[in-house]
Every structure is written in C-alpha cells, then in structure tokens.
Image (cartoon, grey):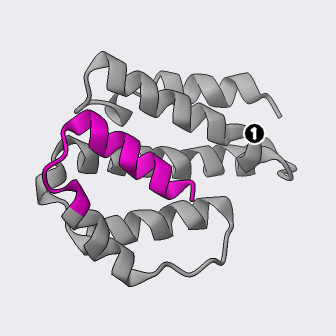
Amino acid sequence: MNRQLLVDRILETENLTSNLDDKDADVLLKWGIAQVDGLIKNVVTEEVAGNKVNQLMMVMREVNELAADPASVTASAIIDLKKQYLQVLGSHEKVNNNEGNAMTRRMANMALHDSLAYILTWLNE
C-alpha cells in the first residue's frame, strides 16, 4: 500500500475543507490523515484502500458542512455522520440515537472551531 498516495489524495481535495479557515482546515486534514493507517491496516489491494479513503473523505466533507453551521445541525444529520464513519471503520457498533439530540443542543451556540473539535472528538469515542 502506498500510504503517501492516499494522504496526498486527502491533501489535494479542496472541497474537504471549503467552509473552514486555514487553521480549522488543518485540524480536519490532520484528523483525516491520522485515520489512514487504521483504514488500510488489513487491506490487501490498492483499490480497496482507495475506496476506504474515498469513504473517509465523504465523512470529512460532512464534518466540514456540519461544523461550519453548528446552529443548524440536526440530530439525524449528526447520527448519519456517526453511522457513516463507523461504516468506514468497518465497525458494527450501534449508534445511540439520543446522542444526536444531545449533540445538537450542545453545538447550537458553538463557534465553528469548537464545533469542529467537538464533532471530531465525538466521532473517535
């Protein structure tokens, strides 16, 4: 597996961070890159690895959208994000739907930077 090619794909995809300033974009990109090793750990082909990274980038795009406007985040959107992320990881963990309501209440008055950090931390729990 050529890890660097996968990392470069993330770094070269502009719409992953289009709603973020440089500092927050860097946070999201570093988070995404940190996921790569775990995603490709047991992957045998470049094609499967590429597909996993494409799925990760879909999650990153959604994080970009949700973090940019935390007051408008819906419980279903945040739950869908977590489900999508768990699918990328190959996890069969169930998502607690009550978490979505709690997340939206907490995020309602957050600044973009704080909502981004909050979402990324929550995804990794």
What residue sits right under mark 1 in the picture? Answer: 37
Q: Residue at x 28, y 34 (%)?
A: 113
Which percent across, then down, holds residue 5? 68, 25
Q: Quadrant of residue 107?
A: bottom left
On the picture, is 70 further left or further right than 45?
A: left
Q: Residue furthest top?
A: 22
Placement of the N terminus among the 4 image quadrants: top right
Which percent across, then down, holds residue 121? 48, 49
Could one spot residue 58 in this view of the protein?
A: no
Which percent across, then down, holds residue 52? 64, 51
Say if the magenta span includes residue 119.
yes
On the picture, is 13 further left or further right than 55?
A: left
Between 23 and 15, the residue placed more toward the observer is 23
Q: Residue at x 15, y 47 (%)?
A: 69
The segment highlighted magenta reads 106-125
Q: Residue at x 13, y 50 (%)?
A: 109
Disc 1 element: helix
Q: Is the residue 58 above or below the residue 113 in the image? A: below
